[in-house]
Amino acid sequence: MSEYIASEREGKVDFVNTNDLEEAAKETIPRGGYGYIQSGAGDLITYKRNITAFDKKVIVPGVLRDVENPDTQVDFQDMHLTAPIIMAPVAAHGLAHVDGEKYTAKGVANFGSIFTASSFASTTLEDIREAGGQDANQWFQFYMSKDNGINDQIIATAERNGSKAIVLTADATLGGNREADKRNHFTFPLPMPIVAAYQSGVGQSMDAVYKSAKQKLAPRDVEYIASHTDIPVYVKGVQSAEDVYRSLDAGARGIWVTNHGGRQLDGGPAAFESLETVVDAVSGRVPVVFDSGVRRGQHVFKALATGADLVAIGRPAIYGLSLGGATGVEQVFNFFKDELELVIQLAGTQTIDDVRNFTLRDSW
């Protein structure tokens, strides 16, 4: 295997929007890693639909509403956040930057939000905690082992490192049809230390990585995690009312709406198309987190107005990491915040609570 050379950049990134980031990152992320990060499944139908689905709803501007200097700050559970915009779990940040999750966690902490560490991180939870700081708000995304003894050890590690939620990813029990990876003959060049007890990562395809984890997930797995920790358990990958009920009945204390950024089942609904259904089924009982296709501040606004409590971003932050390290990550978060503030004011609203009470209209 040839040596994988990731970016070592650190500093301010020159960009206008997330499309600029995606294009520029081609020059800093090796081809195999870039294809893995950037692309999706199959014909990219769901990948593209994730972005265009936001256009099905419009924000009617509000005038004469006596607003200025919008405030994006929120208190979520025991955390104060600069904005309800958090970092989605993404595997192997080391593909984008030599300092990987350490720099992403640092950038997110500097912004003042939640970093979600993937089980398939290229960095340990101890290093992620240290990079973010002891007071950083961090969650842990869990790919369960087929061995509950190993699961117990991983849960204990997450607890020991201050994770404030465990996010069980339920929509990736095997790899989606990621044709870019096949064309690039991509295998992971980096270890996955958090799950080293059941997966090395090095030399493995994404499908092989997923298949090393537990595939036959059921409500009993949510029950198992909830019975072994006091940390709230979120179920990630929910897009139907039936799966909301199944998750909550099993003890989930949060629901995460996503289709894995269009990287799993091609031909399914956009995550935004599923959000309203899920929010109605949750009916305020637990928090709802949303991701997939978020590229603009207006996307964040629309997700919040539809009922999401938090909106997570993935690819844009990884591009920022590659182009500017921790500084680049923080810049990306500020980009979303700045665009969100603009939309909030032009919509005639002032606070995030106002956004949550805003009624979107169907596109004409």
Image (tube, rainbow, N blue to C red):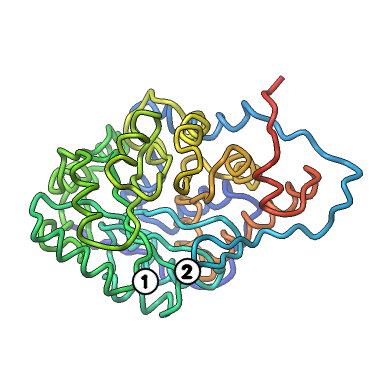
Q: In the rendering, at what x and y percent does residue 123 appear?
A: 28, 68
Looking at the figure, which quarter contains the N terminus?
A: bottom left
Image height of 88 relative to 268, above or below: below
Name which residue lies at 35% across and 27% down: 266
The one nearer the camera, 8 or 362, is: 362
* Residue at which label 1 appears: 99
Number of residues whose C-alpha sits closer than 10 Å to that of mark 2, classed few (under 14), some (14–19) or many (20 or more):
many
Q: Please, is residue 1 above or below residue 359 in the view? A: below
Residue at 37% across, 35% down: 244
Where residue 83 appears, as percent x and y from the top left, is 60, 59
Position of 241 with respect to 121 (left or right) is: right
Residue for point 64% across, 57% down = 337
User: Marks 2 and 1: in contact by CB < 8 Å?
Assistant: yes
Q: Nearer the viewer, residue 217 or 96?
A: 217
Residue 91 appears left or right of 79: left
Is residue 152 toward the left or the right of residue 26 in the image? left
Task: Give me the disc on residue 325.
Answer: 2
Q: Which x, y percent locates residue 216?
A: 15, 38
Choose the circle earlier in sequence order: 1 or 2: 1
Q: Nearer the viewer, residue 44 or 273?
A: 273
Image: 64 above or below 118: above
Percent across and percent down for residue 308 are 54, 44
> In what element is the residue under mark 1?
loop
Which residue type does callout 2 highlight? Gly
